[in-house]
Image (cartoon, helix red, strand yellow):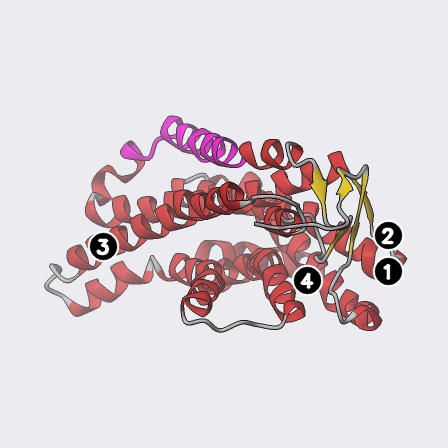
Amino acid sequence: MSSCKNSIPQPLIFVLAGIPGLESSHGWFSVPFFLVFVAAVTGNITILCIIRVEKSLHEPMFLLLAMLSAVDLSLVSVTVPCMLGIFWMNAKEISFNACLTQMFLIPLFYVMESGVLLAMAFDRFVAIWHPLRYTTVLSNNLLVKMALVVLARAVAVLTPAPILVKRLESFQTHIIAYSYCAYMAVVQIACGDVADHIAYGLMVIVASVGFDLFFIILSYGLILHAVFRIPSWEARGKAFSTCGSHLCVISLFYSPVIFSVLAQILGYRMAPHLQIIIDNLYFLVPPMINPLIYWARTKQMRERVLRIFHCQGD
């Protein structure tokens, strides 16, 4: 229950604080944020272009990778420009409706990325358990259906967020102590009983990230079971190596979430500015690192990138 002595009505404009307590360092923070943004955009556009041009990469694994890159590109595009506006131009004001839009889109792409990672785990499961039927099972028709399910699930789970916030009538302040319009950051400055909002926030985590992580772990349990049934150690290593890139990506994506949940369970409270920096890294680091992982660990992708640089060198 958030009680307010001097409450204000629902404001037309919110003010984003950026990283509270470190306002004097916003200029320094903008440098790595900008560099990560450029790297993420360049890397993911490159992957999308390579997969589109290279006919040999029109396979389920790479089509799902293209889906992941498209989501990553969307995620950094709706987060970083707003942050850079705050850091560079002190553009902290955001209209109430724009705040609601951002509140919907940022977690939408995050939940979609989690769903794509689950689809990629299913791809690896089929590749190892049913290698002869791999392209038959994972047909283009099924991939389209999986993409639509990922999108529909994200929309269904996150549509209530702006609707619930729209119903909040009074606030303690119009200043959001965050670098973007996060749902819980807005709820925390609302007046009145926000228990339902907190319950909804937990439901989103469980119904999206928690659900996906459970089935990803289950998929890899079955993959390990299949791999250890192979008599040859060399064949085992070769089979499991096809999962290496995906394992790196899911570790990078889910580790911060698991760390935050464990910190809350163990009662460890981080400084607000540190929490905000870590939350921002959720949306910045995976989109930048994912292309590098697939370039480094996927032979077809690596050869194509090297061919591009070789042609430019000539």
- Return the residue at label 2: 91
For the residues labelled 2 and 1, say whether their Cβ atoms are less than 8 Å apart.
Answer: yes
Magenta segment includes 6:
no
Q: Nearer the viewer, mark 2 or mark 3?
A: 2
Badge 3: few (under 14), some or many (20 or more) residues near its Cα, within 10 Å?
Answer: many
Q: Is residue 128 left or right of residue 138?
A: left
Instruction: Please tell me the numbered disc located at residue 223.
Output: 3
Which label's residue is closer to the chain start, 2 or 3? 2
Identity of the amino acid at label 1? Answer: Trp
Identity of the amino acid at label 3? Answer: Ile
Instruction: Please tell me the numbered disc located at residue 36.
Output: 4
Kindly identify the residue that appears in the image at 78 percent across and 68 percent down: 31
Instruction: Please tell me the numbered disc located at residue 88.
Output: 1
Q: Secondary structure at mark 2?
A: loop
Kindly identify the residue that appears in the image at 65 percent across and 60 percent down: 309
Instruction: Please tell me the numbered disc located at residue 77.
Output: none
- How far, Cα to Cα, is label 1 from label 3? 48 Å
Which sits in the foreground, 310 or 221? 221
Residue 95 x %, y %: 80, 39
Q: Secondary structure at mark 1?
A: helix
